[in-house]
Image (cartoon, rainbow, N blue to C red):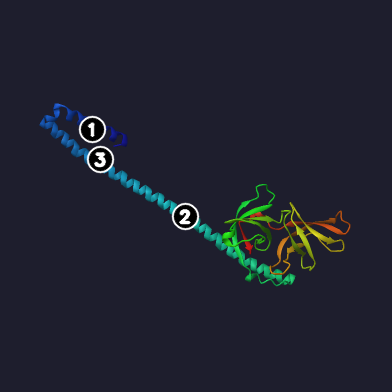
Amino acid sequence: MTGARFHVLSLLVTILGLIVFFSDLSRISYVRTIVSAINQVVAPVVRFKERSVSELREEISTYVHNVDVAKENVRLKRRLNSLLLTEKELAVCLIELEKLEKKLKVSSGFRKLNYVVSRILYYDPTGFDLFVIIEGGKNKGIKEGDLVVTENSVVGFVESVFGSTSKVITTYNEKFSTTAVLGAKGKRYIYRGGFPQGSLLHVGLEDEVEVGEEVYLVGVKKKIPPFLIGRVKEVRRGKDPFFKEVKVEPEAIPREEDYVFVIK
């Protein structure tokens, strides 16, 4: 019996019961017997339907709960996998930095540095990659000026710190500037950010610079390892008669990164 037919039958029985109750027919003994018999037949069906509906609701509620739990398990598994991947990337980072330390003859003790792993929450909507917003701020002890890197390349510096997020200006931003060296050469220059390439400043006419050479960030006090800023893209004579104009293409592309390391 379909649900619609059952409801129609129940309605007819109810109407019939009301007619019998308010008429003289209810006084006739056999009519009372028939009504009683109908009630005995219909009442169990009604109770069965109510119980079935209640059990069905419980089953649906249990199913929905299990589905939510399954989705949460999938999300947590993905989160765990991403953290494990980040841990592996960090291990690779340490190996690469040790190689760079030997190459540039710099001893930084990176393993002793205070750093946190942070997730990128927001990218520059203009498409110029001038900044990113990362997870973690005052709640994680991040401060303005902290260096932000990937496994072996520079992303930028922390410009502004908020409660639980921070703004990072990237190597494409004209506000970004730092000391830098060319390859394993010891002479220091100033790298200034720019889009689509940054610039290496104060490169003398006598300095040998080749396209493709690597440009590394080196801290003034040698407390941080040499992270790769980018590679020389173009070398030419500039307007200044004493210096070359050197364009550098940044290595890190912020919008392609999910996690970064903040060296505090």
The disc labelled 3 sits on which kind of residue?
Answer: Val
- Which residue is outermost to the left? 29
The disc labelled 1 sits on which kind of residue?
Answer: Thr
Give the percent coordinates (x, y) of residue 37. 16, 37
Give the secondary structure at mark 1.
Answer: helix
Q: How many residues crowd mark 2 within 10 Å: few (<14), some (14–19), many (20+)? A: few
Pointers 1 and 2 in contact (CB under 8 A)? no
Give the residue at x 30% y 45%.
52
In the rendered structure, find residue 259 and report the number of the disc placed on it.
none
In the rendered structure, find residue 72 and report the number of the disc placed on it.
2
Of the numbered discs 1 and 2, the one sitting upstream in the chain is: 1
Q: How many residues crowd mark 1 within 10 Å: few (<14), some (14–19), many (20+)? A: few
Give the percent coordinates (x, y) of residue 30. 11, 32
Give the percent coordinates (x, y) of residue 211. 80, 59
Give the secondary structure at mark 2.
Answer: helix
- Which residue is outermost to the top? 24
Give the percent coordinates (x, y) of residue 159. 67, 56
Of the numbered discs 3 and 2, the one sitting upstream in the chain is: 3
The disc labelled 2 sits on which kind of residue?
Answer: Glu
| Left or right: 96 in relation to 203 | left
The residue singled out by tag 3 in the image is 46
The residue singled out by tag 1 in the image is 14
Distance from disc 3 to disc 2, alpha carbons, whole Å, reads 39 Å
Distance from disc 1 to disc 2, alpha carbons, whole Å, reads 49 Å
Residue 207 image-quadrant placement: bottom right
- Residue 102 sits above or below residue 205 on the image: below
